Amino acid sequence: MHNSHRQPFRTAVLVLVWGWLLVLVLAPNLLVVGTSVLTRDPFSFLSLPLTLENYARLIDPLYLEVFLHSLYMATVTTVCCLVIGYPFAWALSRLSKRQQTLLIFLLIVPFWTNSLVRTYALKLLLATNGLINNGLLAIGLIDEPLTLLYTELAVIIGLVYLLLPFMILPLYSVFEDLRDELLLASHDLGAGRWPTFIHVVVPLTLPGVLAGVLLVLLPAMGLFFVADILGGSRNLLVGNVIKSQFLDARDWPFGAAASVLLTAAMALLLFAHRLSRRRLGEEAEV
């Protein structure tokens, strides 16, 4: 009887979840893919015939330079988040549960404020007459204001500021599962701190590193408002190209092709992440 009562509820939940995914995930992505192979029309935005010219335009030197520069800034952002987030997550996992709860709460609190508002707040800090320059001038470290705003550095700072929690949280999860007995066993077998870190800690925390990279790298290429507010016209991300094609140039097919490129890159990273986790699981069983 108990199972018979649970069955309709389970079915309703599955129908709701799959319906949500089909309507709000699969259908919009199929529309984007379909749009990417249509032809631009100045009057109706889209028209036949079908073409792959939009994908061929992605390797145009003008757009390819933007894509490569965007990938470079996203990679630097990911490395910075990893360098900051890895020791922070390790230190966080070593604290008491009460301290962990407090720090995780403080880490998540900024999400309660819109990311656009936080980016504008960061702009006030980096401006010529902003808090950073005024503070450095007041203590005598600089004689004239630094050019921080509308630079590549400003975009990277903004991306790191927004995406750092997405690196810390998966790393903290794997550090929480890291057993102290493994570290003690490594020390008992004669390994020092550095060999233990390289041969024990890094392999066991690699799934968290890969998950963090996955959550930071691709989103960093799409946060167009960060580049708009902090970077100016010389430090564009792929998201800026997509936005300009849809809203300014009204070239929906090309904007959709660029979106499909980002989605395909995300799918490849997810596939690589799954393979790495499976391989690590097989090695752990051996």
Image (cartoon, grey):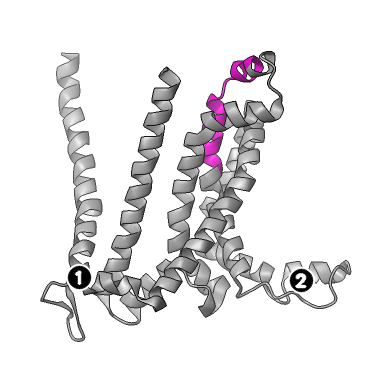
Q: Which residue is mark 1?
A: 52
Q: Which residues are magenta?
A: 168-185
Q: Position of residue 225 (x, y in %)?
A: 48, 69
Toward the left, the furthest residue is: 49
Q: Tag 2: residue type?
A: Asn
**Of circles 1 and 2, which is in front?**
1
Q: Position of residue 72 (x, y in %)?
A: 51, 62
Q: Tag 1: residue type?
A: Leu
Q: Position of residue 174 (x, y in %)?
A: 52, 31
Can residue 114 be seen at all in this image of the molecule?
Answer: no
The structure residue drawn at horizontal position 56% and vertical position 73%, both measured from the top left corner, is: 231
Magenta span contains residue 178: yes
**Badge 1 density bin: few <14, some 14–19, many ≥20, Cα 10 Å:** some
Q: Assign a secondary structure to mark 1.
A: loop
Does residue 277 lie above or below 286 as drawn?
below
Q: Which residue is mark 2?
A: 133
Q: Identify which residue, 123 or 45, lies in the foreground.
A: 45
